[in-house]
Amino acid sequence: MSTANTVLLVVSALLALGGAVGTIAAARPLRAALALLVNIVALAGVFLSLHAQFLAMVQLIVYAGAVVVLFVFVIMMVGATGKVPRSPRGLATKTVSLVVMSVVSLVLVFGVAYVSMPAAHLPHGYGTVEGLGAVLFTQAAVPFELVSITLLVAVVGALAVARGRTPKEAAEARARRAAEGLEADARLAEERRISAEVSAHGGH
Amino acid sequence: MTLSELSPLSLPLLVLGAALIVLLADIALPKNGGRHLGLFMAAAFAAIFGASFFLDSSGRVFDGVWVGGDFTLFFDRVFLLAGTLACLGSLDHVARHMPGRQGEYYLLLAASVLGMMLLPGARDLILLVVCFELMGMPLYLLAGWAKTDDTRGRGKNAAEAALKFYLVGAVSSVFLLLGLALVVGMSGTTSIEALGHMRHSALFDLGLLTLFGGMGFKIGVVPFHMWVPDTYEGAPTPFVAFLSVAPKAAGFAALTVVFLAGFHVPSGSFMPLMLLLAATTMIVGNLFALRQESAKRLLAYSGITQVGYMLLAFATGTRLGTAMLLFYLLGYTVTNIGAFMVIEATASGDQGEDRVSDFDGLYARSPALALAMLLFLLSLAGIPFVVGFWAKLYVFIAAWEAGHGVLVFLGAVLAVVALFYYMRIARAMYMNEPKDTSPIKTPFGVKLAIAICLAGVVGMGAYPAPFLEQAMLASRSLFG
């Protein structure tokens, strides 16, 4: 790895970390979205330093170009300028999660740093546009098609869950609930009448 | 490539076709046609279940990315059965409580079944993760289906159910991907069959552990079980019946493929960990189930306990243990769906509170429902001679032969503890006075689903041999 490459990797990685922290720490939604943008662009830098040019380009086009812009649009449209409420969790919970996460991260860091890694042998052209195209039409054809089904289902489902009731449907639901309530009331009245009769007969 | 090369995938492709018909018909049909879509989907699942006995679905697709055989066939039938029962049981619930979004409900159910059916045959880690997503995404959405439409005003519960489930699912997917990245990074291949011959290194094992964690979330192993009771409580009951069995079966199918057939793991370092998890899962599920007042929550914790028994069968790592795991999953499918359908039948008339006390005097209100629930509970507890008894017995035999006598003893003791809380419901049904004496009107779809489950529980209890043989066959095809 050349010096320039190492510099690119380190700078990008630090920026990506900073962006990730900023995304979850920012109190305003818009700032969180912008921090996410930093994270995404920096990740593209990491991919570049690893010679995955195609992945870096896709990362920029799809995530920085489309996803973050969508986020920003939605935030602007909803006008979410308020601050995120403070977490209701107590100090104990926070400490426990901090300790657990630190242990996990330390294990990962030491794993990467000190365990000898026999680098896997990669076939020629791995990660290039040609290599990716060939895989997409052979081994990865089934998962690729399945991803499109997953996306279709996710869109349809998200729309169905998110859409509210139309006024007409709301009126129907109210009517139905009222009818069910009346039915239950009638049943209750009938039971009262019967039990009253029974007790009246018992009195004779 | 010709079309005939795709023939091993014929069953999942048929499900996909049915799902697309539902999607298009939902647009074309008038607004109140949703119920017909449900009927169509139930019929389609049943027909594909029937077709599974005639179509040859063995073979390799795309150089062994997906491999069909007796193992996939067994699981496909379990998922198709669960899908049929879920559609039947949902017909009235969905038409009544969420009339505005019926077509989408059945579309999502079918998509989830499609993801599950592809899981057992996946021999490529990327395909495995995609199948998990295709299975999981519709489930998160369906868990929150009652969000705005529920006439009983429990939309808040539904939102909580969906959100908790979604967040846990997203985290588990992250774990899966992290494990996958480590494993693939160390080996350079995503093929599960090729990975079996890899030399294990520390990072490779860490990746495997992370993969196991990700799958553990999906099946609800302790300590990844927190989402289960809350999700069950807020989601529509007929959907919970499906959720409580099918994703677990799919999760165990993936675990078996990756860890037993792929990596031959339990013979190595992971065995003590899995046994420990099996024991903890059995104990924790039982202890929490004891104190539940909601029938759905009680069955949720009982389901966690059952996962412990399945994990015990899985941890044997033998061909026999895997066969017993498959039989257990089959028995659990009919039993648990049946029990949740009875809850649906008893709770739907009232305010839908599904408390244990709602079962008070069920015998007086509907003797048939009470008898069905009693048999399902006996099967869950493992009392002779319903299917649950054989399932537990076979798991114990496999675990005993693998040398886990202590865990067999623990499992037997816990089964007695479990009897206590199952019998709480039985006592309420037969001994308590009913608060509400009106007879229960059970919708036809729910009745049919309960009848099918009952036939399974009693039939497999009386003649377990042919089903056990199928499980053995499936296990043999996986281990070769």
Image: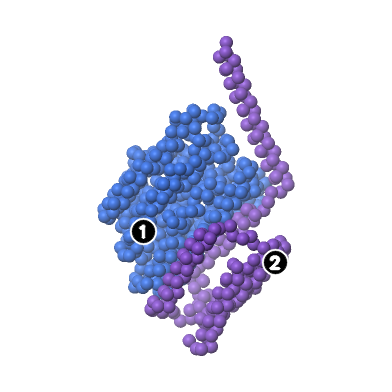
Chain colours: A purple, B blue
Give the residue at mark 1: B274
Amino acid type at mark 1: Met
Image point (61%, 49%), residue name: B156
Residue B480 locus on image (x, y percent): 32, 61
Q: Quadrant of the C terminus of chain A?
A: top right
| Local secondary structure at mark 1 | helix
* Residue in front for this viewpoint, A136 or B390: B390
* Residue in front for this viewpoint, A169 or B362: B362
Q: Are marks 1 and 2 on the same chain?
A: no
Residue extending furthest front? A91
Indicate which label's residue lies in the foreground, 1 or 2: 1
Residue B413 locus on image (x, y percent): 33, 45
Residue extending furthest top? A204
Image point (38%, 53%), residue name: B280
* Residue in front for this viewpoint, A194 or B73: A194
Question: Label 1 marks which chain's residue?
Answer: B
Residue B228 locus on image (x, y percent): 49, 51
- Direction from residue A127 to residue B417 in the image, left or right: left
Q: Which mark is residue A73?
A: 2
- Direction from residue B254 to residue A19 in the image, left or right: right
- Direction from residue B457 to residue B101 in the image, left or right: right
Question: Label 2 marks which chain's residue?
Answer: A
Amino acid type at mark 2: Phe
